[in-house]
Amino acid sequence: MHINFKYFIVSIGSIFLALGIGILIGSNLGTNEAVEEKNASIIEEIDTKFNQLKEKNDQLKAENETFKKSISNAKALITNKEINLSQYELKDKQIGIISFNEREDTSNIETAAKNSGANIAFNVQINESILEKDALSKVNEKLSLNLKNRADIMKLIANSIKTSGTSQELEKLQELGYVKLVSYNGNYDSVTNFVVYTNSNTKLSDKFAMLEKPVLEKFSLNKPTIAITTSTSDSKLLEKYSEMDMPSINNIDDASGRLSMIMLMKYGVTSGSYGNPAEGTVLLPSEK
């Protein structure tokens, strides 16, 4: 539920504009009794409409407070029962985590996934430093390659993760500081679900367009994929992931966000925005 009060302000402004015009007309016609009665009628009408708007405004405020309280109560319940609500829900799921978030770790995500019975097939963080001017020459020298451009580097990263059985290239990229290899079991083909972890806190003008989208396109993700952020991130970033047909969660740092992640994977939901209240966002997904 999203309440926008700007329409009340516009309505009230329109009323007072009408009042001014009415009084101005009345003044030009004179101050006879008929004009005074007309002005009094206008003022009374405005007063009535203003009171009606104020009453509606107060009603919406009360409804909004009730809504926020119910959300708060639901989140508190989920926090207290997080383990019970998600335990064993994702048995036999293999999750691959692709992180572009250098400021927040993935420990809560891994813990929630493992508690639900899932395994982490890989967890790789891709750093912004891959966009530095000398990255191409450093990668070519370190890996004895002849890459031509930045797109080739992104393809290399994706292919290095996708190639089952070895992490040698990833380890060399990690030595250069371009990726962080949190975990990798060498079995990419077993992945059943992907999680993309991002954050709007960056020095780049458009990190999504410059790094995240190009890398993800090299993966050609063909399994259910969820885009997530913490509640400190600008949720508008997730709108770009929605355009890539990914469901999103804006509060993975909350128990309700982690439960949403588990439910999306369990139910196979492939669209929607979940998490903290915002326009078009619901707290938890439901079975499709």
Image (cartoon, rainbow, N blue to C red):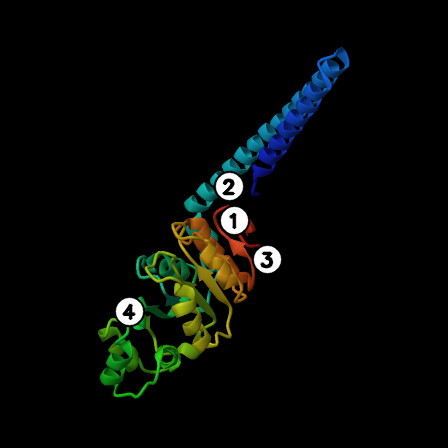
User: Is residue 56 visible from the viewing direction of this image?
Assistant: no
Q: What is the C-alpha distance between the residues marked 3 and 4? A: 40 Å
Which residue matches tag 1?
283
The residue positioned farthest toward the right in the image shown:
34
Which residue matches tag 3?
287
Q: Position of residue 129 (x, y in %)?
A: 28, 69
Q: Nearer the viewer, mark 1 or mark 3?
A: 1
Q: Where is residue 153 in the image (x, y as percent from the top left)?
A: 34, 79
Q: How many labels does the image show?
A: 4
Describe the element under mark 3 as helix, strand or loop: loop
Placement of the C terminus among the 4 image quadrants: bottom right
How packed mark 3 is, by other alpha carbons closer than 10 Å (few <14, some 14-19, many 20 or more), is few
Which residue matches tag 2?
71
Q: Which of the two discs, 1 and 2, labels the residue nearer the N terminus?
A: 2
- Residue at 43 percent across and 73 percent down: it is 214
- Residue at 34 percent across and 70 percent down: it is 124
Question: Residue 129, which numbered label?
Answer: 4
Describe the element under mark 4 as helix, strand or loop: helix
- Residue at 29 percent across and 87 percent down: it is 145
Describe the element under mark 2 as helix, strand or loop: helix
Q: What is the C-alpha distance between the residues marked 2 and 3? A: 20 Å
Q: What residue type is labelled 2?
A: Ile
Q: Which of marks 2 and 3 is in front?
A: 2
Residues at discs 1 and 2 in contact (Cβ within 8 Å): yes
User: Is residue 134 visible from the viewing direction of this image?
Assistant: yes
Q: Which amino acid does label 4 sit on?
A: Ser
Q: What residue type is labelled 1?
A: Leu
